[in-house]
Image: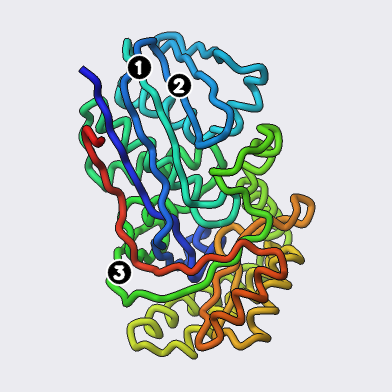
Amino acid sequence: MMKKIRASVPAKVILFGEHFVVYGKRALAAAINRRLVVEASSRERGGYHVKIASIPTFGLEMDLVTGEEKARPYKDYDAAANAIAYVRESIRYLEEKYGIGEGEGVEIEIKSEIPLSAGLGSSAATCVATIAALKAYFGVNGDLDVIREDANRVERRVQGAASPIDTAISTYGGYVLVKEGEVKRLHLAELNLIVGCIGSIPLSMGMATKKFSEMGLKTKKIVEQVKERKEVFKSIYDAIFDVSDAITAQAVTAIEESEFVKLGALMNINHGLLDAIGVVPRRLSELVKLSQELGALGAKVTGAGGLDEMGGVGSVVVLPGESGERLKGAMEIAGALVMDVETGGEGLKIEVGFD
């Protein structure tokens, strides 16, 4: 009998504390109303066949006893495997931990409204949705906390280091506060924000696999560079990280008390700290400055940030105040993909036997 499972998860914005959270400081993130969907269904042949929107299809066949892999059909397996590093590692992890998949053929299709390499949680969303869909498909316990932990382990395998914040938002939705690895779900009012993505790669866009694979592990490189600089300037970075922690704590209070002018000011300060640790490329810096000059209450880089040598790819999040339409027009003229978003969206959703 044909089995079909659909798992969908939200994108995220980190409002405060990205990068600093990796070292135990507080970070606040929110789900936004853009989603990624993973569909798992039966196929006649064994192994996994993965399709990502309009990215060229390729097969990934895995011998779940020996771990041997082969691609069929695809002329450039190495590039294809890099392009779906998070899917590939999710499959490996689930086989190792739960022993699932032996003798089964599974078709996996991924559809997304989340631009890639934009700091909006596409990798975490992919991990959470893939793990949730395959667990449901194979009848493994779908406890949300365990799914989140599994997805975070997969992210760490691929990236080398990963905060639990992205996978927490993908799993739970709403708002989460993370400190020293502990995840706390918060109930805060929704915010209307503008997200501007520079040089992002929508999953719905056909593109060369080589370019996709080059951008796929951007976060890993940025995290490694921050770590290197922190080791050289330890006392300075420790002070910066402590200030970030205090900013995040005050930001939660500002949202609770609807103090949006204060919230915007805290966003601007947090952006300055991210610039100080070297994760704000020129194009994102210009987009933040443009937003601030046109009347935004606050603007900052969100997520990992970017690297000039990789085209300055990344996103900024803007608290627009009363200047939203003017801001969006100016950001588009500056070359950004602009999205109106609302925070506090629904977390992981699983459907069985959908039409």
Tell me what residue is drawn at x 54 percent, y 78 percent.
Answer: 267
- Which quadrant of the view contains residue 84? top right
Q: Is residue 127 above or below residue 9?
A: above
How far from the left and from the top, in percent, is residue 107? 39, 23
| Residue lying at the far front of the rendered structure | 355
Mark nearer the N terminus (1 vs 3): 1
Instruction: Report the front residue among 218 and 328.
Output: 328
Q: Name the side, left or right, on which 64 lies relative to 147.
A: right
Q: Amino acid at mark 2?
A: His
Crowd around label 3: few <14 · some 14–19 · many ≥20 (10 Å): some
Instruction: Report the front residue among 87 and 274.
Output: 87
Please state which of the two labelled residues, at mark 3 or mark 2, is closer to the viewer.
2
Is residue 341 visible in the rendered image? The answer is: yes
Crowd around label 2: few <14 · some 14–19 · many ≥20 (10 Å): many
Q: Is residue 129 above or below residue 278?
A: above
How far from the left and from the top, in percent, is residue 110? 44, 37
Q: Tags 3 and 2 in contact by the CB under 8 Å rule?
A: no
- The residue indicated by pointer 2 is 49
| Residue lying at the far right of the rendered structure | 309
Question: Mark 3 falls on what kind of element?
Answer: strand
Q: Name the side, left or right, on which 340 lies relative to 4.
A: right
- The residue indicated by pointer 1 is 43
Q: Amino acid at mark 3?
A: Leu
The disc at residue 186 is 3
- Which quadrant of the view contains residue 85? top right
